[in-house]
Amino acid sequence: MFLGDCYKFLGVNSDADEKTIRKAWRTKTKEVHPDVNKSKDAAEKFTRLTDAMNVLLDSTERMKHDRQFGYHQKAKNQDSNSKQSFTEFQETKAKKNVEEWSKDYNAAMEIRERQRGQKRLKHKRNIVFVLLGILVGVIALLIVVHFLYSDKMNELMKFVH
């Protein structure tokens, strides 16, 4: 892990893209590679150079590095000249509009809840009527079955004929 300022070490700007970073790394490696440079610390310099490039190519590590060394970018609208200023009238009107819209929204939500409650009640009534219909049908069926298998049914049949 590289501990210094990677941009300065590689000689690139803080907004450098991947291609620029790799090009700077290749240029520097020609100077510090252990096969070319015979100094004792060439291998260490080459390792540090590679670590610096890896930090800048990994987006997470690059963000950490940028925050540590003060390269983090401001949001685009954070500059004082890009902020839009409003008059007191505009601010008051905007607040009033937000309040009105909030009231309208709340009223609409109350109406919606009432409608949902009415639909639930209607569905409950329908279920009750269906269950009552089933119950009446079952009772009628029981009565018919009872008369079919009883002596009274025979008497009723004689009376009808």
Image (cartoon, rainbow, N blue to C red):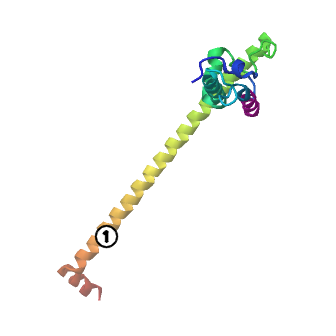
Q: Is residue 31 visible?
A: yes
Residue 51 left/right relative to 157? right
Q: Quadrant of the N terminus?
A: top right
Q: Position of residue 101 (x, y in %)?
A: 67, 27
Q: Main secondary structure of the magenta part?
A: helix
Q: Give the residue displayed 73% in from the left and 29% down from the top.
A: 30
Which of 96 and 63 lies nearest the eye of the viewer?
A: 63
Q: Is residue 73 visible?
A: no
Question: Label 1, on which residue?
Answer: 140
- Span highlighted in magenta in the image: 18-27
> Most extreme residue toward the front, as rendered?
38
Above or below for 138 versus 3: below
Residue 25 falls inside the magenta stretch: yes
> Most extreme residue toward the top, as rendered?
88
Residue 44 left/right relative to 11? left
Which of 61 and 42 lies nearest the eye of the viewer?
A: 42
- Residue 43, quarter of picture: top right
Above or below for 45 versus 147: above
Q: Give the residue displayed 17% in from the left and 81% down from the top.
A: 151
For numbered disc 1, what is the local secondary structure?
helix
Which of 9 and 29 lies nearest the eye of the viewer?
A: 29
Which of 131 and 49 lies nearest the eye of the viewer?
A: 49
Residue 26 falls inside the magenta stretch: yes
Residue 159 left/right relative to 80? left
Above or below for 69 versus 28: above
